[in-house]
Structure formats: structure tokens, C-alpha cells
Amino acid sequence: MDRSRVFGHRMREHRLLGGTAADAVDAVRAMVGAHAQIPSAADLAIGLRLRAFAGAGEGLTRTFGPRGTVHLLPTADLGHWLPALAAVPGRGAADPYLDADRIDQVCAALGPILADGPRTLVELDEAVPAALGSWAAEQVIPDFGGLAARWRRAIAVAAHRGVLCFGPNRGRRTTYAALPEPPAPQPERAAVQWLAGEYLRAYGPVTAKDLARWLATDAGWAAAALGSVDGVVRDGDRFDVPRTDEPPAVAGTVRLLPYFDPYVVGGQPREVLFPPPVRARAMTNSQPGTRPVLLVDGVVAGIWHLARRGRRATLTVETNLRWNRALRSAFDDEIALLETLLDTTAQVVLGEVAVGGHA
């Protein structure tokens, strides 16, 4: 694998190199979804690709994306995304807490309930059992050290069926809402082919195991999905889309990526993207994205943390990088952008990041 070519293509596709995103929708589409468990991190990921503050806005839907985690997805692409995610093995299948018939019942009940407007989980914990019976309220689902109502097991499935998405928060409380304009779903095979193609575009070359990890599914299904993409190129166990143009050079590029930035969460192979000197610090239990990272020449070269105090902040950067004048200048430019995006003035400290990774 020619690393400079691969990272040049990937950084350009992610709008991190050789130009910027046209708008927030273009930025999220380029990333193949923006991880939005931490909304501020998603906003920063978008801003870095626009090189200006934008944040999530019109044209984006907050819902359950790859691996069942919270993502921002382009609203116009939901007709592809939702049937593709619903087709992933393990999504929507019966489990020990809720069988397939009851999953169907919950999904059917949520539509009429949400037709009256967004609801919090507390409100849904009353409304769903009222519609379906006491079994839906049984406290059986492990949930942050406690137990949650049985019906909640179907929330992500309902999202992938187009029944709901995240609504506007009420203070600190999450709400769920009906999709304002339910998309016309594509046939399952076409949707899966589309999603596999988007993953190849942004992250190729990849193996079936890479796609399986990104979607939390089995490699056999992932191999069939990748093999179905029109024009796919295969070299041994690696798949890619045709790339005939020359990628931009990555030498001397510096980026400060936030928590769960898709470039590192979906990027493979991990041993190349996270070289040994920083791997243990940049990942938590082999999971990427749990720390903001310093990206140099397309590869993780350190971690960072920003501690804000009003309009001022301390930016701690932990790296073994050997600085030269060009890298330091690129680093200073990235800090200036970060200050603009976060509306702060940062004092930079090169040293150990004492804060642990995000769970």
C-alpha cells in the first residue's frame, strides 16, 4: 500500500485536504456520516471541513447510524441509509429482550405516538406501554448501571425503519420525533450497494473485515456488499473504487481532529493510521475516537485536550513529533482555526494530556 497516495485520497475525500466542503451537508456526506454522540464534536468535525463555523443545521438528521451509534446523516440520503442499515445482519433481529414480533409492535405504536410531536424517553415510557401493555414497561434492559424498559430495545430499529429520529433537546433531555419528510426507501440491495460504495470512496482500499467492523456485522456479509459495488477493484483481500487521478500531497499537513472524527473511526488499517508510538495513548481498549488526535501527514501523531475557562482556554498537545519550521507553521494555522471555530483564545502547552479518553 502506497501510504502517501492512500492518505492523500482519503484526506481529500474527507474534505481535509485540497479544498473544503461546500456546506455542512457536503461535509457530513464526505465523512459518510458524522458521529454525533457528542454534538459539539460533530459540530467541530463539520467546521474543520468548512474551515469556518457552521455546525449541524438544515439538511441533516440526527439518528442512529453505523454500529447503532448516534450520527448526523444528510436528510436527502436517508432513502439509501435507512434500508441499508436495516439490512445489516444483527440489526432488527430478535434478541433475548425483545422478539421480532414485539419489535414490530413497538415500531407500529411509535408512529401514532410521535405524530403529536417530539417525546422524551420519560414520556415514551408511559405512552408505549399504554399502547401495548405492561410487558413493554418491564425493566430488563441494562442501561448505565440500571435497567430500562423493555420497549426501548426497539428504538434503533425504529429509526432504521424511518419511524423516528432525534428531536430537539428539552434542556438536558433527549427527545425523539417523527421524520419530517419520511424518505422514499431504495430497494435493499441498491441501498446496501450504495452504502458500501460510499465507504469505499471515503476509506478505500479496505478489506471486508474493515467494513464489518465499521458496521458491527460479519465479514461474509460485508464481502458480498463490497463485491456488489459497480466497478469495484479487487487486489487480494482489498477492495477499492477506481482512482486514476493523482492525490494531493499530504506531507506537511497538520489537523486537530475532535472526538470520534470519522476519519480515524473508520480508517484502516489501524496499525498504520495509529503507529506504535501513539497507539496506546490515542485509543482506549483498541477503540479509536475516544481522544481528539493530532494528525500529521494523514497519520495520528499525538493527542490533544482543550480546557476552556470562559473565552480563554489551555490547549495541551501530547506528541513525540520532531517539529520543523514548516510543521510548526501548519500547526499554528490549525490552532488559529480551532480558536475561530470555538470562539476562544488558546494557550498552547506541549506535554502530557492528563484527561482520560471518552467512554
Image (cartoon, rainbow, N blue to C red):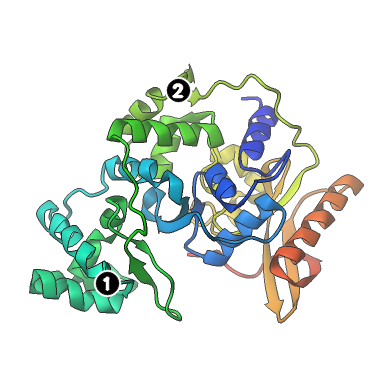
Name above or below for residue 44 compared with residue 298. below
Q: Quadrant of residue 348?
A: bottom right
Q: Which residue is mark 2?
A: 237
- The amino acid type found where label 2 is placed reads Asp
Residue 93 numbered mark, or none: none
Nearest the viewer among 108 and 288 is 108
Three-letter code for the amino acid on which mark 1 is drawn: Asp
Secondary-structure class at tag 2: loop
Choose between 61 and 200: the one closer to the eye.
Answer: 61
Q: Which of the two discs, 1 and 2, sits closer to the camera? A: 1
**Residue 52 position in % (x across, y down):** 71, 57
Along the line of sight, the residue nearer the viewer: 213 or 204? 204
Q: Residue at x 71, y 82 (%)?
A: 310
Q: Residue at x 70, y 30 (%)?
A: 4
- For this orientation, the residue located farthest to the right is 325
- For residue 222, side relative to residue 15 (left or right): left
* Residue 222 visible in the displayed image: no
- Quadrant of the frame with the N terminus: top right
* Residue drawn where x is 12% and y is 71% of the image: 131
Q: Earlier in the sequence, mark 1 or mark 2?
A: 1
* Badge 1 element: loop
* Residue that mark 1 sits on: 116
Q: Position of residue 99 (x, y in %)?
A: 12, 55
Contact, mark 1 vs mark 2 (Cβ under 8 Å): no
Q: Position of residue 203 (x, y in %)?
A: 54, 36
Residue 359 vs 171, above or below: the answer is above
- Left-right relation of 59 to 294: left
